[in-house]
Image: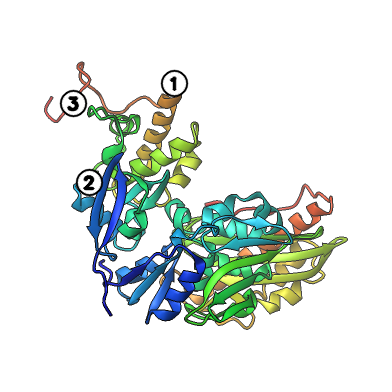
């Protein structure tokens, strides 16, 4: 309940933050603190120093030009509400809208969620499916890491100890593309940690899917891309073919039981969510081509 | 390593400026309670229950999941800051009493703050929107139904609209509440 004492830095510039992070032994970065502070309260983490990014100006606004750019202090509720994110990155918008709860969404940040790499992180799954890029900066320079390569293990990413996730970049959506994210939380809730969550992005031409990206969260040691379902979705045109493809969502992914679900339960949830998310993504992709299907099913899974 | 063990923080709490020395690891909830704002509760230790909810710069947040130093320069409203300075109850508090939105009362401060933040941005929320706004606040007593009813009644009262549900708690003629045996 009481974090261990630490040295506290609240730099006013990003450069000062990078310096503090690399100079202070055992320092960790804090943006929203919604994952970091609970871990410090139970002393799973006890960093010797915290570098609080909260006072640095210029990192709290989403901008859209040739990419959708989400910098380090943008809160979940901003990502959920932003019209450009909804337009170009619907899966990320839906993941942010369903993350945590209202109080958590007021403080928690998307970049923080990426760096924290919770095995049940909502936005990490969406970031993978949307082919996002993590822009990681240290005093040594800046690296661009594809989201697909970013998550390496439970709470482990490709970041070096002195790097800060400066922003994530999501490609703009072209006509014929659509995405969606669906999850089921603990006790069947629509929010909170997902027992299973699936993000799907598709590109459609004519009737069916020509390209797909899928990611799953909440069922394993980390969020995973699902190449099995990605390949199976190519050529899918309707509920039947999508449902068939969704049976492969967990191919090659080690499903782990936890307090909130056994392997069979989580696997079942994942395949159902995958099918519904794929239907919603395909419906959005078709709509962007001016095609409407009144019999389509899709959209949010309401509690 | 030489470390300053405390930092000075300036926080406006219920519109009163407070400038104090805090250790960086002091959680905002403990800082508030140390200053006497004990209406803000420590409930779960896992950032789940929301009994610690306060409003910081207009947003409902969990004060147990913030360090006091992060609140530097902010405006914080605790449950003590709802209602008027003459001791009059906020319409939400009256509605919670009228509609039995509490039993033990432990979650109530947090519920009131989340509800107050909702009503500040939404004059006519639906029942689903109220439930959604209270997702981060847990109650072990009521089953939530009366809490939702109370929030909707307070919203109606603020709009000057007739409430959908009549109060379930009977008042005395002088406006007070009946106690056992009366």
Position above or below: A273 against B87: below
Q: Is residue A111 left or right of residue A85?
A: left
Say whether mark 1 and mark 2 are on the same chain.
Answer: yes
> A57 or A66: nearer the eye?
A57
Which element type, helix, strand or loop, lies under badge 3?
loop
SS type, badge 1: loop
Q: Earlier in the sequence, mark 2 or mark 1?
A: 2
Percent coordinates x, y for residue A261 in the rendering: 46, 70
Q: Are there few (<14), some (14-19), or many (20+) residues within 10 Å of tag 2? A: some
Q: Which residue is mark 2?
A: B37
Query: Alpha carbon of mark 2 to alpha carbon of mark 1: how far?
Result: 31 Å
Please state the horizontal and vertical placement of residue A105, each as a whole percent of the image: 48, 55
Residue B65 placement (x, y as % from top left): 35, 60
Disc 3/disc 1 C-alpha distance (Å): 26 Å
Q: Give the camera-side residue of A70 and A153.
A: A70
Give the labeled residue for mark 3.
Answer: B178
Q: How crowded is the residue under tag 1: few (<14 C-alpha within 10 Å), some, or many (20+)?
A: few
Give the labeled residue for mark 1.
B160
Instruction: Tell me the number on the disc at residue B93.
Output: none
Secondary element at image label 2: loop
Q: Is residue B165 visible?
A: yes
Report the side of A63 relative to B58 (left or right): right
Q: Residue at x 36, y 66 (%)?
A: A37
Q: Nearer the viewer, mark 3 or mark 2?
A: 2
In the rendered view, tell whether residue A26 sits above or below residue B72.
Answer: below
Looking at the rendering, which quadrant does residue A187 occupy?
bottom left
Subunit ID for the residue under disc 2: B
Whether marks 3 and 1 lie on the same chain: yes
| Separation of marks 3 and 2 at Cα, in angstroms | 28 Å
């Amino acid at each position: 309940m009481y974090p261990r004492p630490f040295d506290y830095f609240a730099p006013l510039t990003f450069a000062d933050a990078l310096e503090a992070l690399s100079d202070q032994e055992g320092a960790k970065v804090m943006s929203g603190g919604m994952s970091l502070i609970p871990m410090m309260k139970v002393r799973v983490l006890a960093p010797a120093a915290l570098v609080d990014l909260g006072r640095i100006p210029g990192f709290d606004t989403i901008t859209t030009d040739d990419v959708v750019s989400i910098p380090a202090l943008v809160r979940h509720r901003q990502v959920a509400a932003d019209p450009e994110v909804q337009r170009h990155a619907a899966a990320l918008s839906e993941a942010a809208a369903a993350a945590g709860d209202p109080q958590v969404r007021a403080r928690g940040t998307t970049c923080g969620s990426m760096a924290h790499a919770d095995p049940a992180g909502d936005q990490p799954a969406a970031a993978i499916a949307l082919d996002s890029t993590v822009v990681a900066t240290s005093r040594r320079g800046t690296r661009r890491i594809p989201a697909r390569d970013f998550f390496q293990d439970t709470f482990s990413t490709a970041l070096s100890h002195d790097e800060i996730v400066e922003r994530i970049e999501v490609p703009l959506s072209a006509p014929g593309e659509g995405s969606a994210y669906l999850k089921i939380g603990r006790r069947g809730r629509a929010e909170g940690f997902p027992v299973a969550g699936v993000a799907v992005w598709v590109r459609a031409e004519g009737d069916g899917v020509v390209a797909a990206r899928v990611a799953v969260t909440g069922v394993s040691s980390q969020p995973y891309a699902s190449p099995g379902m990605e390949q199976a979705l190519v050529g899918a045109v309707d509920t039947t073919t999508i449902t068939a493809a969704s049976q492969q969502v967990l191919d090659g992914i080690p499903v782990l039981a936890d307090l909130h679900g056994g392997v069979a339960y989580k696997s079942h949830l994942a395949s159902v969510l995958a099918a519904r998310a794929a239907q919603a993504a395909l419906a959005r992709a078709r709509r962007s081509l001016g095609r409407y299907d009144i019999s389509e099913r899709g959209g949010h899974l309401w509690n | 390593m030489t470390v300053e063990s405390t930092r000075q923080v300036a926080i406006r709490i219920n519109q009163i400026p407070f400038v104090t020395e805090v250790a960086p690891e002091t959680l905002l909830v403990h800082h508030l309670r140390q200053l006497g704002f004990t209406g803000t509760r420590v409930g779960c230790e896992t950032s789940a229950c929301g009994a610690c909810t306060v409003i910081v710069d207009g947003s409902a947040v969990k004060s147990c999941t913030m360090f006091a130093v992060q609140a530097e320069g902010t405006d914080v409203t605790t449950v003590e800051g709802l209602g008027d300075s003459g001791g009059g109850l906020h319409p939400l508090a009256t509605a919670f009493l009228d509609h039995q939105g509490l039993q033990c009362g432990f979650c109530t401060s947090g519920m009131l703050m989340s509800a107050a933040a909702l009503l500040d941005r939404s004059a006519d929320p639906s029942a689903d929107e109220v439930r959604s706004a209270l997702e981060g606040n847990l109650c072990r007593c009521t089953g939530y139904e009366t809490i939702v009813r109370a929030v909707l009644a307070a919203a109606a009262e603020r709009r000057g609209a007739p409430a959908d549900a009549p109060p379930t708690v009977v008042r005395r003629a002088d406006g007070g509440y009946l106690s056992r045996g009366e």
